[in-house]
Amino acid sequence: MRTRIVSGGQTGADRGGLDAAIALGLPHGGWCPRGRRAEDGKIPGRYKLRETGSAEYPERTELNMKESDGTVLFSRGPLEGGSAFTANLARKHQKPLLHIDLGKVGALEAEQILLSWLSENEVAVLNVAGSRENKAPGIQRLVMEIVAHAMRRRHEGS
């Protein structure tokens, strides 16, 4: 199954998921706040994000949630802030939700957990979200590797 990846384009886990899609040539995109603002400035066009009508993050989070078949949240530690909000939205919309705490599992185990969850929940459109780069340095690259390896293995298995 060819997965499409959506995300809000913030630094960290969001961009890691989109970077994986770009590296693998997978369809990708999603929603970002009007003005394309992120903690490091304007979100680059390569992520193919559409702007919401609002400059606030909750609207883009809900649109990405609704557009997806399921959400994976990556963090180092418990969910907080925007990640906790995203988890609550997943429950509200009754969408499959997976939280991977990279403080508790390594990359290989995270990849296996994600691959199994994708299959069990028949996720074709995956929303990737989680910690920002300033809260969890290195998470963008790590999420990119985990998602890319899981997607590669998923494609090889189909």
Image (tube, helix red, strand yellow):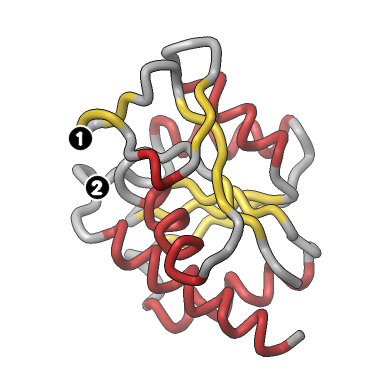
Q: Residue at x 43, y 32 (%)?
A: 82
| Most foreground residue, 128 or 101 | 128
- Secondary structure of the residue carrying tag 2 is loop
| Residue 36 placement, left or right of 127 | left
Q: Work out whether 12 lies above or below 51.
A: below
Quarter occupied by the C terminus: bottom right
Q: Residue at x 60, y 56 (%)?
A: 27
| Most foreground residue, 92 or 124 | 124
Callout 1: 10 Å neighbours few (<14), some, many (20+)? few
- Secondary structure of the residue carrying tag 1 is loop
| Most foreground residue, 113 or 23 | 23
**Residue tagged by mark 1?**
40
Quarter occupied by the N terminus: bottom right
The residue furthest bottom is: 156
Name which quarter of the figure residue 126 lies in.
bottom right
The residue furthest top is: 54
Amino acid residing under circle 1: Asp
Q: Work out whether 96 lies above or below 104.
A: above
Name which quarter of the figure residue 39 lies in.
top left
**Residue tagged by mark 2?**
133
Q: Work out whether 130 lies above or below 149.
A: above
Residue 48: image location, x then y, percent:
49, 41
Callout 2: 10 Å neighbours few (<14), some, many (20+)? many
Amino acid residing under circle 2: Glu
Q: How many numbered badges does the structure rendering display?
A: 2
| Residue 78 placement, left or right of 58 | left
Name which quarter of the figure residue 102 lies in.
bottom left
